[in-house]
Amino acid sequence: MLKIDGLCRPGLQPASFTLAAGECVVVQGASGAGKSLLLRAIADLDPNQGRVSLDGHDRAEMAATAWRARVGYVPAEPGWWADRVDAHFLNWNDSLARRLNLPDGMGTAMVVQLSTGERQRLALLRALERQPHVLLLDEPTAALDATATALVEELLAERRAGGMAQLWVSHDADQAARLGGRRLVVEHGRVREEGA
């Protein structure tokens, strides 16, 4: 279980909630409300205060690399640091890429030649490769068509069935309804559970 207690940073008021193994919680709110700030704070990518723990292990007691291996983050605009796609992976996997309708040989593609949707799906695969316990998803299907979105949702549903918890930012009301479960709403940096 991921436990958030009083997590805050500039632009984000203290937030407290839990995320159980295998659970998907959708995060919604207007653009600029603080949704990405919340995910980045949980991932410990920006200075923040408060307590965050996973399965009873406090984030403050772990090296950043150990935390990020357990709590993966897929940003809305993924970063790339090498020319070829496969340089961003521990072991490129064509069969998993095919699950997301990416062509064979994509591992040898040049990043600059990729579409936005291809980069978005590859960033998800990159995060899944490390088999995190929790996955923080910042609009992972925003640049995808309906077919690719369905494939991403199917793959992530399988991972939830295997115990992976997911905190999923989405502006798509239909997608939020498909994902089901609890919803967090972020308004002007304040996080509240819908209906609370």
Image (spheres, rainbow, N blue to C red):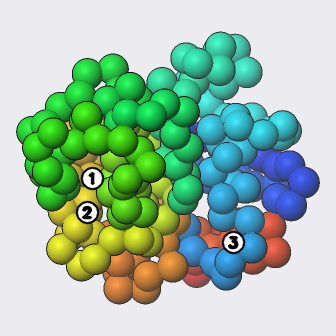
Residue linked to disc 1? 156
Residue 52 placement (x, y as % from top left) = 67, 35
Say whether residue 10 is left or right of residue 2.
Answer: right
Residue 138 placement (x, y as % from top left) = 53, 59
Q: Is residue 154 at least partly visible in the picture? A: no
Contact, CB < 8 Å: mark 2 with mark 1?
A: yes
Residue 13 is labelled as: none
Residue 186 is labelled as: 3
- Earlier in the chain: of badge 3 and badge 2, it is 2
Badge 3 amino acid: Val
**Is residue 89 placed above or below 103 in the rendered structure?**
above
Q: Quadrant of residue 164?
A: top left
Mark 1: secondary structure? helix
Residue linked to disc 2? 153
- Which dot, 3 or 2, sits closer to the camera? 2
Q: How far apart are the two marked residues, 3 and 2, measured between alpha carbons?
A: 23 Å
